[in-house]
Image (tube, coloured by chain):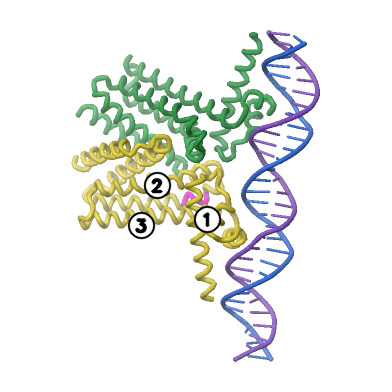
Chain colours: A green, B yellow, C blue, D purple
Amino acid sequence: MKWQQRKSRETRQKLLNATLICLERDGFHSFRLDRVAHEADVSKGALTHHFSNKEELLAQAIEKVLAEFVDTLERGVDDVHADRLSLDGFLDLMWRHMSGQLYMVTLEIALKARHEPDFKTLLTPQVQHFHARIDVIWQRLFPHLPAEQATNLMNLSMNLLRGMGTQSVFREDTQYFNGLLNSWKAILRQQITA
Amino acid sequence: MKWQQRKSRETRQKLLNATLICLERDGFHSFRLDRVAHEADVSKGALTHHFSNKEELLAQAIEKVLAEFVDTLERGVDDVHADRLSLDGFLDLMWRHMSGQLYMVTLEIALKARHEPDFKTLLTPQVQHFHARIDVIWQRLFPHLPAEQATNLMNLSMNLLRGMGTQSVFREDTQYFNGLLNSWKAILRQQITA
DNA sequence: AAAAACAAACCGTCAAGTCGGTTTTTATTG
DNA sequence: CAATAAAAACCGACTTGACGGTTTGTTTTT
């Protein structure tokens, strides 16, 4: 009861990674189970053995990517506290993730959820938990501010970054986005000192 | 050469409206031509007669919805100039549209475009034109500010609203979004007086 | 021996686009 | 001003290919 356990976990992780790669590369509309299997270098039979359907695969993949993002931010705020990272650096860290695989994958999933109540019901607690953890992270980031204000700044920041992620589909222009991010950093500084 | 012209335009408009309805209701993944035809109350044959494929239909539908949004904003800024509308009211107007059909439809289309280079090439000029017009609108909104700053505030605002639109998939909470919008209005006021 | 991991053939469904039609309008011409 | 040719609007059956899930079979581990 050891070898099998390890092998199973290994295969499942390979499949979840492949799922994220395919989802970002192909989009949900063109997301194909056989391509996931191929990308993970396992057979389609193996995939169906470990995940009984598409939804299960997607839900677990999204859980993984959200958890990894929050972990990264948690380390980031630790670094800020330890003076290894500035506030600007923290925002850069967020943007680096929000302009990459994470956001596009969650966007694909969000749109799917919007039209499939069951899937949405499955994901909503996950998303809420995700946001709750980020909320805590921002309160740790601004310990001197009232929790309410920290939350508010977090929500503004997250939504700005979300919007930027969306716009980046049609406008690939690093300079432009860095400019926007810098403007926002300046505004944030004003807000926390005011 | 009169009756046919009118009938043709009529049917095409019905189909474009039906396309937007279906796209918002079903999402691109579940977007079906026969449902569009049914929604528009024409036959599938009529649809294929007027639009040779899905992409053509979608591209023209998106053109329509973007143009209507810009027209609304243009009227909005006229109203601001005529003191019939406050700056807050203008932002409310934007949010009303960005939280409705407009944004969800463009989001569906953006994700499709992301994975289909031809379709993206087809849409990019449209999107750029859209943004250029909004740019002008914001420069008219803040005639006393340097154009560059107006543009910058516009881009921040648009992206914040985009992000809020995205979040609204998982968080239906009018109060919360109104709160965010109010925070942003306050920040905007600071920025334009500073 | 039985259960897990994996493999792959197979099937049913489903929708986009094609195609051969019909009907109505418009253009042409004696 | 017919008569008629051509073109446009429209209809719906059919083809075709794709893909998710099922099922049956094989190998390896427990």
Chain under callout 3: B
- Identify which amino acid the numbered label 3 is placed on: Asp
How far is mark 1 from mark 3, CA to CA? 26 Å
- The part of the chain drawn in magenta is B121-125
> In terms of sequence position, does the residue under pointer 1 or pointer 3 come before the other?
1
In terms of secondary structure, where does tag 3 sit? helix
Residue indicated by mark 1: B39
Q: Is residue A28 left or right of residue B145?
A: right
Of A173 and B19, the residue lying toward us? B19
Q: Nearer the viewer, mark 2 or mark 1?
A: 1
Question: Does A139 appear in magenta?
Answer: no
Question: Which residue appears at 32% of the width and 56% of the height?
Answer: B74
Q: Nearer the viewer, mark 2 or mark 3?
A: 2
Q: Nearer the viewer, mark 1 or mark 3?
A: 1
- Identify which amino acid the numbered label 2 is placed on: Gly
Q: Position of residue A41 (x, y in %)?
A: 66, 25
Crowd band around label 2 with a 10 angstrom C-alpha radius: few (<14), some (14–19), many (20+) = few
Would you place residue B171 above or below residue B47 in this image?
A: above
Q: Is residue A136 visible?
A: yes
Q: Classify residue A150 by image quadrant.
A: top left
Please give the label number shown on residue A143: none
> In terms of sequence position, does the residue under pointer 2 or pointer 1 come before the other?
1
Residue indicated by mark 2: B100
